[in-house]
Amino acid sequence: MKQLRTVLKESGVLTMIKERPALAEVLFPKSAEQVMDSQTILKRIIWPMPDSENEDDHSNVEETCLVTGFLRDYIEKGQITR
């Protein structure tokens, strides 16, 4: 939670929501019939994909897979697994 709060604060989202509370409903919609469980969150994430068009990108595919794997585990289980 501390990291999430820090990211929201650094990105300006937290300040924006404090200044305009109505934006919270737009950014984080609530729906009685929709349950936000780990699978719903995972379905909404746009996961990074290798970009074959951009050959200048030297990003490490293994590192990306490792990080996204940790994120998936954390969202599904609610804890960090090592």
Image: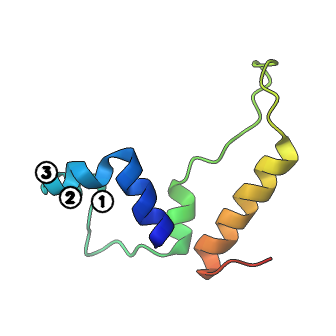
Instruction: Name the disc covering residue 19, or none.
Output: 3
Q: Would you say 9 lies left or right of 81 here?
A: left
Q: Which residue is mark 1?
A: 28
- Answer with mark 2 or mark 3, whichever residue precedes in sequence: 3
Secondary structure of residue under mark 2: helix
Percent coordinates x, y for residue 4 in the rendering = 46, 64
Instruction: Name the disc covering residue 61, or none.
Output: none
Q: Quadrant of residue 48?
A: top right
Disc 3 residue type (three-letter): Glu
Secondary structure of residue under mark 3: helix
Marks 2 and 1 in Cβ contact (< 8 Å): yes
Mark 3 or 1, closer to the camera: 3
- Compared to residue 21, the image places residue 2 above or below, namely below
Distance from label 2 to label 3 (Cα)? 13 Å
* Residue at 29 percent of width and 74 percent of height: 33
Distance from label 2 to label 1 (Cα)? 5 Å
- Answer with mark 3 or mark 1, whichever residue precedes in sequence: 3
Q: Which residue is mark 2?
A: 25
